[in-house]
Image (cartoon, coloured by chain):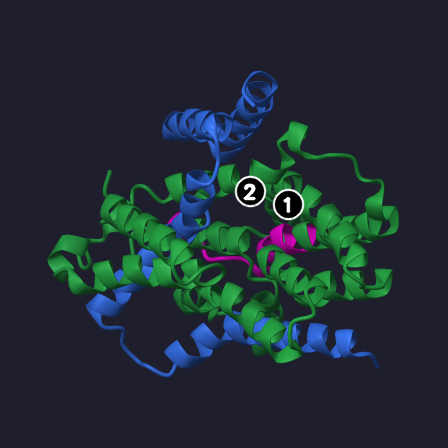
Chain colours: A blue, B green
Amino acid sequence: MSTTFWIIIAGAIATYLTRVGGHLVLSRFETIHPRVEAGLNAVPAAVLTTLVAPAALGAGPAEWAALIISGLVALRGGLMAMFLTGAVVLILARQFVS
Amino acid sequence: MSTEAIPARSGSSAFWQGARLSIPVVVASGPFAALFGAIAVDNGFSVFEAFLMSASVFGGASQMVGIELFGHHVAPWLIVLSIFAVNFRHVLYSAAIGRSLSHWSAPKQAIAYFLLTDPQYAFAESEAQSGRKVSFVWYMGAALTVYFFWNVLTLAGAIAGTFIPDTSALGIDFLLPIYFLGLVMDFRKRPLWLPIVIVSGIASIIAYKTVGSPWHVSLGALAGVALAVILPPSRSGIGVDPEHMP
């Protein structure tokens, strides 16, 4: 098998370790300390923010408009409404802003 | 818990309820699967290798980073390490969601963790928060739908190769950040949400500018999590059942 094949397999194993590892390590503890629990509760917002913030900073007015307006829609509507609004605003804004 | 009376979702309807949830994810990530396939072939992967990477790694950002480095002839171990770094956030997902999946058999859990992507974690976490027991069939409905389209569209993109037109006008390149923002907003009822988002956002931008991608994901997240750990438990609402506050 080629080097590429083995890079892919090694990458897949490394990825699976990250997906199963957190649970395997943490399940060894019988009780969870309140601070650990507070930390775990913070995980989703903390991680997902890092996938937005640098992308937003490196973007332009069209992308900012899409983020701001879809963010406002998210305050009232569901995820699908928010997402579709953002996509529409982005496509329209890119026609006028370059 | 007062919410035990809510029954778990069951049967084939549970599968389709999960599948329906994942439609926005398919729409948002599908173009990236096709793009990944096309770029992978362009960077020297065979169509089979592009498909194999989607099927075995199943993590968009890490796959993009992997083929980018592959195109620059970086040492194999460094490519694997970068894939590991991009995906390191899953350790946190895995640790957080483990409590909600522990009533499944070991093989079911082993399969479920293989499919634990960002949106899949968000689905499972919000399902657990709603008071229902997370059903395996429901979980697989959401996960396999995304997995199926991710692989099919990778294959399509790889075969289509360079024939994919300029995607910028359609906004495809910025759909994922919008989608991730939606997921961030979904968690806004959680204790300390705003401080965590601000700290993680600033830390990830600093890390992005200094250490560079892909470390901004792990470092930014660690900053937000560290804030929640450092602040007194009373501030973070632990012990007052914050998930059921209005």
Percent position (x, y) of residue A28?
Answer: 37, 83
Residue B147's tag is: none
Residue in the picture at 12% in, 57% down: B234
Of the residues shown, which amino acid type is indicated by label 1? Answer: Ser
Tell me the quarter of the image containing the N terminus of chain A.
Answer: bottom right
- Tell me the number on the disc at residue B176: 2
What's the chain of the residue with tag 2? B
Is residue B131 highlighted in magenta? Answer: yes
Asked if labels 2 and 1 touch by Cβ distance under 8 angstroms, the answer is yes
Q: Is residue B69 left or right of residue A2?
A: left
Q: Residue furthest right?
A: B159
Mark 1 secondary-structure assignment: helix
Q: Which residue is mark 1?
A: B29
> From what the image shows, is residue B16 above or below residue B121?
above
Residue located at (57% from left, 16% from top): A96
| Position of the C terminus of chain A by quadrant | top right
Residue depicted at x 64% and y 77%: B75
Q: Give the CA distance from mark 1 to mark 2.
A: 7 Å
Q: Which residues are magenta?
A: B129-145
Within the magenta stretch, is there residue B157?
Answer: no
Left/right of residue B171 with respect to residue B126 in the rendered view: right
Count neighbours of disc 2 (C-alpha within 10 A) and say few if under 14, some if 14 to 19, many if 20 or more.
many
Q: Position of residue B79 (x, y in %)?
A: 62, 72
The part of the image, by quadrant, that contains residue B61 is bottom right
Q: Is residue B138 left or right of residue B200?
A: right
Q: Label 1 lies in what chain?
A: B
Query: What secondary structure predominates along the stretch shown in magenta?
Result: helix
Secondary element type, mark 2: helix
Instruction: Mark 1 vs mark 2: tell me if same chain.
Output: yes
Q: From the viewer's perspective, is residue B50 above or below residue A83?
A: below
Q: Position of residue B140 (x, y in %)?
A: 63, 57
Give the amino acid type for the residue marked by disc 2 in the picture. Answer: Leu
